[in-house]
């Protein structure tokens, strides 16, 4: 089985490192991290299998795109890339908005989010391999 390219986009370097460390324990995942949506968009031509994208990306750099803006641009460039949105917001409205813009799932950051993301990744990739 060839390795699957997973992009993780978050402006929190510690969270990025923790997610990358967690995903590195899963066989056949090649994880690439990005501190901004713009840096992720610059590498979309490398065809990631899944993008994990934080909703709040402009907390450190005011001019940076937020997660919803990045999601829209990903979907314009390649609609078929599955995007999992991450947020610390426990808001149905935010989750619904991200799903309506093309995200396939919304994960609330917390104690269980790393396990939830890795389970989702395996499910998404298995479904895509079956088609």
Image (cartoon, helix red, strand yellow):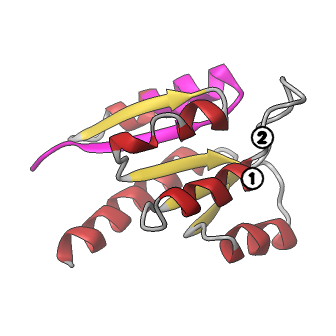
Left or right of 50? Residue 64 is right
Question: Looking at this rendering, what residue extends furthest in the right direction?
Answer: 62
Within-10-Å neighbours for mark 1: few <14, some 14–19, many 20+:
some
Percent position (x, y) of residue 40? 54, 36
Is-magenta flag for residue 8?
A: yes
Distance CA(mark 2)–CA(mark 1)? 6 Å
SS assignment at label 2: loop
Placement of 130 over or under 64, stated as above or below = below
Q: Do callouts 2 and 1 mark residues in contact (Cβ within 8 Å)?
A: yes
Placement of 78 over or under 40, stated as above or below = below
Q: How many circles with numbers are drawn on the protein?
A: 2
Q: Where is residue 75, by image quadrant?
A: bottom right
Percent position (x, y) of residue 101? 68, 71
Which of the pair 71/73 is nearer the observer?
73
Please give the residue where the numbered disc 1 appears in the rendered image: 69
The circle on residue 25 is none
SS assignment at label 1: helix
Is-magenta flag for residue 105?
A: no
- Residues shaded magenta: 1-20
Question: Looking at this rendering, what residue extends furthest in the left direction?
Answer: 1
Left or right of 74? Residue 36 is right
Which of the pair 51/89 is nearer the observer?
51
Q: Where is residue 72, by image quadrant?
A: bottom right
Report the residue at 53% width, 45% height from top: 114
Look at the image and tell me in which quarter the C terminus lies. Answer: bottom left
Report the residue at 78% width, 71% height from top: 97
Percent position (x, y) of residue 51? 49, 49
Please give the residue where the numbered disc 2 appears in the rendered image: 65
């Amino acid at each position: 089985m060839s390795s699957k390219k997973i992009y993780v986009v978050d402006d929190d370097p510690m969270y990025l490192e923790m997610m990358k460390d967690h995903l590195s324990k899963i066989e056949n995942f090649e994880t690439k991290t990005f501190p901004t949506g713009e840096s992720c968009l610059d590498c979309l031509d490398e065809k990631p299998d899944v993008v994990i994208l934080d909703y709040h990306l402009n907390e450190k750099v005011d001019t940076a795109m937020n997660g919803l803006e990045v999601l829209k641009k990903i979907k314009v460039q390649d609609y078929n890339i599955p995007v999992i949105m991450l947020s610390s917001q426990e808001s149905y409205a935010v989750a619904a908005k991200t799903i309506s813009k093309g995200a396939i799932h919304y994960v609330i950051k917390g104690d269980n989010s790393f396990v939830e993301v890795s389970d989702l990744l395996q499910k998404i990739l298995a479904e895509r391999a079956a088609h």
